[in-house]
Amino acid sequence: MLRRRLWMGSVFVVLGAIMLAGKGIFAKQLYSLGVDFETVAATRSALAVPGFAIIAFLSGSFRREVRLKPLHAAAAIGAGLICYYLGSMANFYALTLIDASVERALLFTYPALVVLLSVILGLEPVRRSTLLALVTTFGGIALVVGIDSAEVLNANIEGALWVFFCALTIAIYFLVSARLSPGMGSAMFTLLAMGAAGTAFSVHYELRHGWLNLSMSTEAWIWLGALILIATIIPLSLMAEGVRRIGSQRAAFASTIGPPAAAVMAVVFLDEQITVFQLLGILVVVGSIVYLEVIARPGRSL
């Protein structure tokens, strides 16, 4: 029974990571159809909220709402605004500047940022193995953004900074979620966070463009639906369930399939070109995260 639970949990995380890796592919397709990044980010966030509400209802989270503390709810809302509103806006803007494969590799640095913030906040002790993992992670980032080539570096640096900001917001969200989700349930936490972000995006888009002026082709709506369903609601739900079954450490290990999957999809579907140094950088980032989660943080046994 335990083996089946662990196996299914790993499958959920792997599938979720692969589906999330497709986010950049869907976004790039929408950009090619003339849809701007603000429209993509706002409609994705606003239209995903009902899906997360359904999942929260089916999971029984609403039956636990009586135990929801106002301060905890406010923290979940704040985390949602930081990650799913500010972070998502930065991420989708970055995808207008850099390749999807580069974006996914840089975004995957968030586990290292979780550890870095934990050390800064005194939540984890400073260990040499942890510092080594952080150094190699950021070394991998340097290769991904093209430190070996001035031309590649100039093309990626601005987008890389926006993605790095997004990764930082994800790290903040992860720390808040880890503290509050056990009490209110992961589905309720996600609903509050996504609901806040969806509301913020709705107001943002209304003030900037006006929802009544929203106009997209049928093909664009199909790609947007795929982005919301295949690269947002389903994978985030799968990964949340996977983490519940196998724990965050095994989930972090299983999710390392994300950057390589994104690189393959970007080459196949977008005809993106990846240099040898960028590929090496992706592998260094993935390897550093595996080392960080499996070896460098004792007391979290597999």
Image: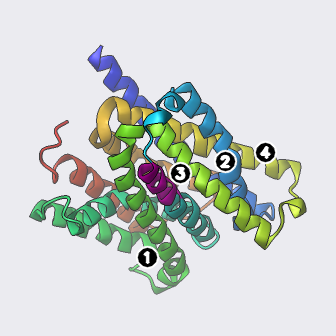
Residue under label 3:
193
Q: Tell me the number on the disc at residue 227.
A: 2
* Mark sitting earlier along the chain (2/1): 1
Tell me the distance, in whole angstroms, between the alpha carbons under discs 3 and 4: 25 Å
- Residue 140, given in percent of the width and then of the height, sits at 33, 67
> Start and end of the magenta stretch?
70-80
The kind of secondary structure element at disc 1 is: loop
Q: Residue 12 falls in which quadrant of the image?
A: top left
Q: Are marks 3 and 4 in contact (CB under 8 Å)?
A: no
Q: Is residue 74 magenta?
A: yes
**Closer to the observer: label 3 or label 4?**
3
Residue under label 1:
146
Quadrant showing the N terminus: top left
Tell me the distance, in whole angstroms, between the alpha carbons under discs 2 and 3: 19 Å
Three-letter amino acid code of the residue under disc 1: Gly
- Rendered residue at 51%/42% (across/down): 236
Q: Identify the colour scheme used.
A: rainbow
Q: Tell me the number on the disc at residue 222.
A: 4
Taking 192 as reference, is 302 above or below it? above
Three-letter amino acid code of the residue under disc 4: Ile
- Rendered residue at 42%/30% (across/down): 11
In the image, taking residue 127 as reference, residue 102 lies left or right, namely: right
Q: Are marks 2 and 3 in contact (CB under 8 Å)?
A: no
Q: Is residue 107 visible?
A: yes
Residue closest to the eye, 174 or 138: 174
Tell me the distance, in whole angstroms, between the alpha carbons under discs 3 and 1: 34 Å
- Residue 105, given in percent of the width and then of the height, sits at 44, 60
Three-letter amino acid code of the residue under disc 3: Ala
- Residue 27, given in percent of the width and then of the height, sits at 67, 57
Quadrant showing the C terminus: top left
